[in-house]
């Protein structure tokens, strides 16, 4: 079946602009996770959703970052007033539920802030 | 704080030359240890989950093992297509996120 999809695959933006990154989880998966992978650093957890609810936002690096999920499916990660340090690959993962251990990743969105 | 350390950072192998990757972890209440494979420009691909010390899992030329402090990923008689970055991650009880190590980049030469 179809895996996790993310769009766009690449995004180049100018410092100070807002960007939206989209994640389409595997059909039927209620848990959705966002991670960030920067050069020289491992994957860093940002936020997770159970259904449309985000109980843990502690991983978001600043208040410029926000995420939402509607209809228990598609999620959008928004970064306002982008900075150069936001440049990274943003990865989305999903699983059947939060109690399910394995997480299945999408291909990622490579964000470059000039 | 949960810590996951992978070694070596990079591994260059000749085709057929078996080797092992290490993942050591310091966590309270391990719920699961995970191995992923990541190819350049792609997302991590799930390989294995290990839950308790002594457990082993195998898939083709890969075998993962777990002790109370570390996990090993053994690559037997590797082929060039096994070239990738291998990521180790842990999940602890009462938490939902995966905590990843920095990865080991494996290059297998024909």
Image (tube, rainbow, N blue to C red):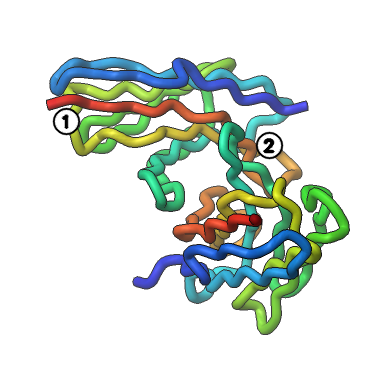
Question: Measured from the top left, where is residue A89 in percent x and y?
Answer: 56, 52
Placement of the N terminus of chain A among the 4 image quadrants: bottom left
Quarter residue A15 falls in: bottom right
Q: Quadrant of the C terminus of chain A?
A: bottom right
Q: Earlier in the sequence, mark 2 or mark 1?
A: 1
Circle 2 sits on which residue?
Answer: B92
**Distance of mark 2 from mark 1, alpha carbons?**
34 Å
Determine whether A57 is above or below A41 in the image.
below
Point out the frontmost of discs 2 and 1: 1
A29 and A6: which one is in front?
A: A6
| Residue holding disc 1 | B79
User: Please, what secondary structure does the residue beneath circle 1 have?
Assistant: loop
Residue B54 visible, this angle: no
> What residue lies at 18% left-to-right and 16% top-to-bottom?
B17
Chain of the residue that carries numbered disc 2 in the rendered image: B
Q: Residue at x 64, y 50 (%)?
A: A87
């Amino acid at each position: 079946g179809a895996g996790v999809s993310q769009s766009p695959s690449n995004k180049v933006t100018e410092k100070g602009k807002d960007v939206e990154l989209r994640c389409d989880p595997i059909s039927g998966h209620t848990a959705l996770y966002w991670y960030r992978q920067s050069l020289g650093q491992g994957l860093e957890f940002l936020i997770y959703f159970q259904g449309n609810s985000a109980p843990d936002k502690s991983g978001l690096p600043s208040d410029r970052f926000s995420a939402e999920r509607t209809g228990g499916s598609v999620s959008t990660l928004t970064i306002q007033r982008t900075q150069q340090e936001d440049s990274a690959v943003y990865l989305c993962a999903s699983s059947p539920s939060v109690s399910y251990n394995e997480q299945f990743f999408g291909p990622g969105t490579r964000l470059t802030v000039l | 704080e949960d810590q996951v350390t992978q070694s070596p950072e990079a591994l260059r192998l000749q085709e057929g030359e078996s080797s092992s990757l290490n993942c050591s972890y310091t966590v309270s209440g391990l719920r699961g240890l995970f191995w992923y494979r990541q190819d350049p420009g792609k997302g991590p691909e799930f390989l294995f989950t290990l839950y308790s010390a002594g457990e082993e899992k195998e898939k083709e030329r890969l075998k993962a093992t777990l002790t109370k402090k570390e996990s090993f990923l053994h690559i037997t008689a590797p082929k060039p297509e096994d070239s990738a970055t291998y990521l180790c991650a842990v999940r602890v009880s009462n938490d939902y996120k995966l905590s990843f190590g920095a990865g080991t980049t494996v290059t297998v030469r024909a």
